[in-house]
Image (tube, helix red, strand yellow):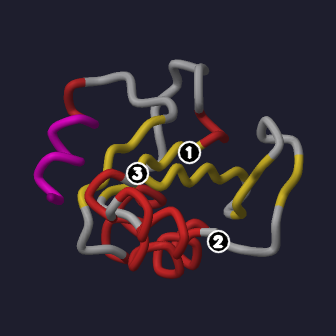
Amino acid sequence: FATALRDAVGRDKVIGAVDSRGGHIVVHGWKTALPLTAVEAVQALEPYCDEFLYTHVDTEGLMTGTSIDAILAVRAATSRRLTAAGGITTRAEIDALHASG
């Protein structure tokens, strides 16, 4: 599927959404966990996507802060642009993520 999508529309038009909870990818409305980490997913999808949207589901919507370490691990796994979501609440978190690239 990923190859067909990339070939049909061009990699530059594909954003891969990667959602994780408890360290594993979740699908079906965040209800089903897969035996795959966010880092593994990003590495596998990188040839097909121009950028990624990573959601740290553990902290999404809680306004308690995010896991900078989890986001930085995903950041380190790809050379593509990364947008992070999930619990980011302070300017300090934004600045720390921005400084990481």
The answer to whether 49 appears left or right of 35 in the picture is: left
Picture coordinates of residue 3 (x, y %)?
Answer: 52, 75
Q: Secondary structure at mark 1?
A: strand
Q: Name the N-terminal-most of marks 1 and 3.
A: 3
Residue drawn at (52%, 49%), measured in percent from left and top? 17
Give the distance between the C-alpha atoms of the residues marked 1 and 3, in whole angstroms.
Answer: 16 Å
Q: Residue furthest right?
A: 32
In the rendered structure, find residue 56 and report the number of the disc placed on it.
1
Q: Is residue 94 magenta?
A: yes
- Magenta stretch in the rendered image: 93-101
Q: Quadrant of residue 85?
A: top left
Q: Quadrant of the C terminus?
A: bottom left
Q: Main secondary structure of the magenta part?
A: helix
Name the residue that disc number 3 marks: 15
Tell me whether the residue at label 3 lies in contact with that at label 2, contact meaning CB atoms closer than 8 angstroms: no
Name the residue that disc number 2 marks: 37
